[in-house]
Amino acid sequence: MRLLIMGAPGAGKGTQGIVLATLLGVPHISTGDILRAHVTGHTDLGREAQRFMDAGRYVPDEITNAMVGDRLTLPDASAGFVLDGYPRTIAQVHALDQVLVRAWNELDGVLELAVEVDELVRRLLARAQTGGRADDTEDVIRRRLAIYDQETAPLVDLYTQRGLVSKIDGEGTEADVSARLLSAVQLTTSRAGIEPG
Ligand code: B4P
């Protein structure tokens, strides 16, 4: 089962991606988490990525593409994955297409979490108050949302043209959203003839 989870910052990609991946028995691969691990580990890649992340901007495609290309070729991803926060640009879509073609694989579905802007900002500011991330300040949150609209939202249309997108209402409790996601995934798995792990 190869799934993408898409949505604006604060839509619940990370929160729900973990639930979904656990249920399906596949790895949850979050580019944000991988980048933050590099920052915490003071790697060269982390030092390069940090200035973009702290400013709410996207890390350059060549960095994220190489990182995801490597991660998806690890053995645990051979049976599937939930990819969270990638692709975010058209160049990343093309890079992911190539990784999948090389492995003779295809995506099974794209889950888009839809949440109103005011609620996105509220959630991220709430996270900021409970010891959140360096990029959870109001001006950086607004920039992340603007960049999402400009660069990433159009990718949902592209995947819609490929017949892959299920749009899910991302508002309500985490349990409500999980339940909606699971029924969307059950439809996708039955269409693809796959048994959840
Ligand atoms: P990410 O880590 O992907 O961060 P995000 O988009 O802000 O979403 P996140 O997963 O953290 O939040 P979620 O919606 O789950 O990326 C961070 C940065 O890394 C990017 O800005 C960029 O610089 C860089 N980056 C990552 N991938 C990249 C790529 N492919 N290319 C270039 N750069 C890249 O949750 C947010 C909050 O809402 C949480 O506190 C959660 O508890 C809460 N929440 C979730 N669901 C809720 C619900 N139903 N009700 C109430 N609160 C809820």
Image (spheres, helix red, strand yellow):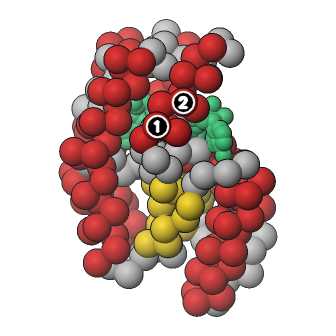
Q: Type of residue at label 1? A: Asp
In this image, 91 relative to 3: left or right? left
Specify the label residue 118 is tagged with.
1
Element marked by disc 1: helix
Q: Nearer the viewer, residue 197 or 157?
A: 157
Q: Nearer the viewer, residue 31 or 67?
A: 31
Q: Nearer the viewer, residue 114 or 7?
A: 114
Element marked by disc 2: helix
Residue at image location 59% in from the left, 80% down from the top: 188
Q: Residue furthest front?
A: 118
Mark yes or no: residue 107 visible: no
Instruction: Assess disc 2: are there few (<14), some (14-19) or many (≥20) residues with their C-alpha within 10 Å of its C-alpha.
Output: few
Residue at image location 31% in from the left, 42% down from the top: 148
Residue at image location 34% in from the left, 63% down from the top: 156
Q: Type of residue at label 2? A: Arg
Q: In which quadrant will I find the N terminus?
A: bottom right
Q: How many marks?
A: 2
Question: Does 147 appear above or below 86?
Answer: above
Label 2 with label 1: CB-CB less than 8 Å: yes
Position in image of residue 104 (x %, y %): 42, 75
Q: In which quadrant will I find the C terminus?
A: bottom right
Mark yes or no: residue 51 visible: yes
Residue 143: image quadrant is: top left
Residue that mark 2 sits on: 122
